[in-house]
Amino acid sequence: MDQETEVVEIAEKPKRKRLRRYYSTLHVSFELGYKAVEVFKMLFKEVLKEFCDEVPFEIHMDKLVIRSMDVSRVKMANLVFPKQIFEEWIVTSKGEEVNLPIRFQVPLEDVKYAIEDVGKDAKVRFDINVAFVTTKPFIDVEVRNPPSCPKCGRSTTWNQLKADANKRGRKPYKRGNGYRENYKCQCGKRFKLSVYTKKERTTETAVDEQKSTFIITVKEKTTDTYSIKPIEFLDGADPLPKLSPDARFKLNAKEFRKKIEKLNKNKDIDHVTLVGSCDKLVLQAAGDLTGVTVEMDKYSDILIDAEAKSGEHTLKLSLGQLMCVLPKKLADLVTIEYSTDMPLRTQWFMNLESTVEFFLAPRIDTDL
């Protein structure tokens, strides 16, 4: 007897359509020469080490920004270099449009190693190539009609009606899996609310870190090339503090730092209080056994200028942290500005068109 064979056709599941990928690249190249080389070398060797282990680069179309906050979030560096200070500045893209600024960080020690011994006649070139992958998927978006209350303007996301009463009022809506319901706003207004979903195309861009490169080329007696990895890309930068200073002082950077260094040598003293007015700046430092007061008069060799609102303005700071935001060699002049119990801002004035500023949180003593 012939055995009957039953043939069952299995419907194949439709294959999910693979998203199309769009590839693009961003090329950034800038070259330092003469004054800029010396400034970058000192900033990377002596200054930034107090703020970060990974140096963050933020590339704009017309400037380079390096902004970093230390691990304890007590102090911040904000360095802004316009493209005019570079001997060459190139920002180009290929493929899909690239949105600037772009932020990434590389190990500080690797950058220091590349430029720590360059001379004043050297040329230092940075070449950064960033690879992007873009997809444009569809996502479900909820639509609420009306989106806001016609009476008070509140969003229609919080229905004041009880859940059971709300369910009884639901009716099928003609679009997909949408529905209509009775809605009561917080202002008391009642109306019909329609809710449904629709498809919307979005754009998602990711960085291909494996294909991105960061290269430093130093041209002096020889041509040395340094390729640095890994490159870690960042979503955003720390915002700058919003300050409204009550006192501002312009100082001889070298002489003022000497005074702070001398105070810092006293092991009994770990903090200093600034007391500023429109005609002088006073440093008050006291430990368990020692007390020191330093008065600087307006228009003196050390305090070049002073501006302040009426009265005295005080700020207590850690001596060790204050040393980190004062220049050693790069600047001849420095300004400090502050309000009572608000962050201190210092700005260095150098022989280079740039913004080099630092922020330092006040020391606040708490009684246990």
Image: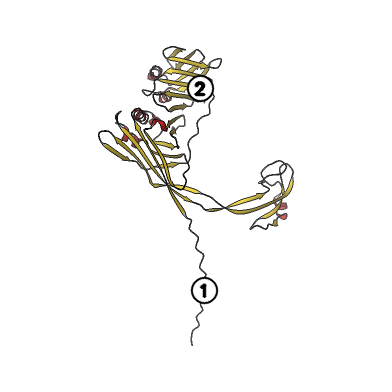
Q: Please state the horizontal and vertical placement of residue 147, each as a whole percent of the image.
A: 66, 46
Q: Please state the horizontal and vertical placement of residue 281, each as a whole percent of the image.
A: 47, 15
Decide: is 13 above or below 230: below
- The front one of 295 and 138 is 138
- The front one of 167 and 147 is 147
C-alpha gap between disc 1 and disc 2: 80 Å
Decide: is 161 above or below 333: below
- The front one of 26 and 294 is 26
Chain-order first, disc 1 or disc 2: 1
Identify the residue under disc 1: 9
Would residue 345 be found to the left or right of residue 156 on screen?
A: left
SS at mark 1 in the image:
loop
Instruction: Specify the farthest residue to the bottom.
Output: 1
Q: Residues within 10 Å of mark 1 (few under 14, many from 20)?
A: few
Would residue 30 be found to the left or right of residue 156 on screen?
A: left
- Which amino acid type is marked by label 1? Glu
Instruction: Specify the farthest residue to the left.
Output: 221
- Which amino acid type is marked by label 2? Tyr
Q: Please state the horizontal and vertical placement of residue 138, each as a whole percent of the image.
A: 54, 54
Q: Residues within 10 Å of mark 2 (few under 14, many from 20)?
A: many
Residue located 48% across and 42% down the image? 99
SS at mark 2 in the image:
strand
**Mark seen at residue 338:** 2
Instruction: Report whether residue 287 is seen.
Output: no
Residue located 51% across and 16% down the image? 307
Instruction: Report whether residue 7 is seen.
Output: yes
